[in-house]
Image (cartoon, helix red, strand yellow):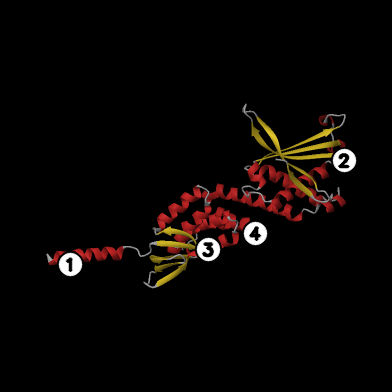
Amino acid sequence: MKKLLILLILIVFASFLGTSLFAESFILKNEQVAKGEIIQETDAFIIVKKADNSRGYIRKDQVEYRIPDMTVTEFLEKAQDYSKKNDYKTAYYFYLAAEFAESKKTEVIIGLATCLIKRKEYDKALSKVKYGLLWENNDQLQLLSGELYSLKGEFDKADEIFIKIKKNSPNLTKTVDALIKENQERRLYEKARTSTPSIKDFKDKVGNCQDAVDNAKKLLKWSQESDKETFIAVNLSVFVVGKKESDIEKTEDLRKAVSVVDLKIIVEKERFSGLKAVIDEKERKILAYGWYFFIRSTYYRANKINIDICYEYTNRKKEKRLVTFAIVKWGTNGVNLNIEYTR
């Protein structure tokens, strides 16, 4: 009987030792992670027992998020669940908790980098990916590093990485080609964005500012083809007084004859307006410049230019029609071109 009692005590004691002391993970506001078994909790502090059995004190006002203790696999499952719901903020917390337990795991690094990309923290995301590549030089991390260099505007570096992956991993050719195309589109847009002159400069050099015209055309093409989720279509219509446009054979004659130009840009309203932070105010202004430059330089005798940004609306009869959402127009001082929202 005595031996049986001793055996039971040993089993209970062994079970206690096998239980993790880390009852909770604390994501702090500085994005550091603390873990420990809660010994005491007050209004201001949480006292925990750490892995070395020492005590730690966590200020409650520094805690951003609390997570019950889990395995790395469970952390990742939770993070992926939140990512599917587009809740990348919470997903990031679970990836941080997983990183604290297993920082070299590729799945953890990719998850952290993806969340940071959503936050547009490209340098920080690239730092995570470079760390992962120190331990495992795999294609997933290499692809992500190329995409991050592209997002950072280091287009040559991105192409170098993509070409190398394409050479070493032929099975990824389709994926790499898509990323190379995205990189090229970003390159063209960035060139247009950084080299487009001011409206005043353009007015002073109409017909003699080929760089502005070329970049405007690229912007027009980019807005139509590069981001189909935001820009559904770009429709340009021209009108000639007293004639049909189709009757004018020579391009130069048509350019001289056009008196009215209508540009309708059909957009996904929320994405374009910034409510989902897809296109910010600065980018919208650049696009407005580009569209105007394109029309003004191509049809330089037009006395009326209409640029309407529309969205599709389905009425009660299920008939789709376009609703003007914003109008591109001159500012009150005659210098700045602005997007004026009408709805």
For marks 4 and 3 on the same chain, the one whose residue lies earlier in the sequence: 3
Q: Return the residue nearer the eye: 139 or 91.
A: 91
Q: Looking at the image, is mark 2 or mark 1 nearer the viewer?
A: 1
Residue 256: x percent and y percent? 87, 38
For marks 3 and 2 on the same chain, the one whose residue lies earlier in the sequence: 3
Rounded to the nearest angstrom, the CA distance separating label 4 from label 3 is: 31 Å
Q: Return the residue nearer the eye: 76 or 87.
A: 87
Rounded to the nearest angstrom, the CA distance separating label 3 from label 2 is: 58 Å
Identify residue type, mark 3.
Lys
Identify residue type, mark 4.
Glu
Q: Return the residue nearer the eye: 183 or 100.
A: 100
Pick the quarter of the image with the C terminus: top right
What residue sits right under mark 2 in the picture? 301
Question: Up-down: is 223 above or below 90?
Answer: above
Identify residue type, mark 1.
Ile
What residue sits right under mark 1 in the picture? 6
Q: Is the residue marked by circle 2 packed among few (<14), some (14-19), or many (20+) residues within 10 Å? A: some
What residue sits right under mark 3 in the picture? 29
Residue at left offset 40%, top offset 55%: 73
Q: Is residue 105 left or right of residue 220?
A: left
Residue 83: x percent and y percent? 50, 50
Question: On residue 154, which mark appears?
Answer: 4
Residue at left offset 66%, top offset 49%: 279
Q: Residue furthest left?
A: 1
Rounded to the nearest angstrom, the CA distance separating label 2 from label 1 is: 101 Å
For marks 1 and 3 on the same chain, the one whose residue lies earlier in the sequence: 1
For marks 2 and 4 on the same chain, the one whose residue lies earlier in the sequence: 4
Is residue 15 visible in the rendered image? The answer is yes
Rounded to the nearest angstrom, the CA distance separating label 1 from label 3 is: 48 Å
Is disc 4 placed on a helix, strand or loop? loop
Rounded to the nearest angstrom, the CA distance separating label 1 from label 4 is: 68 Å
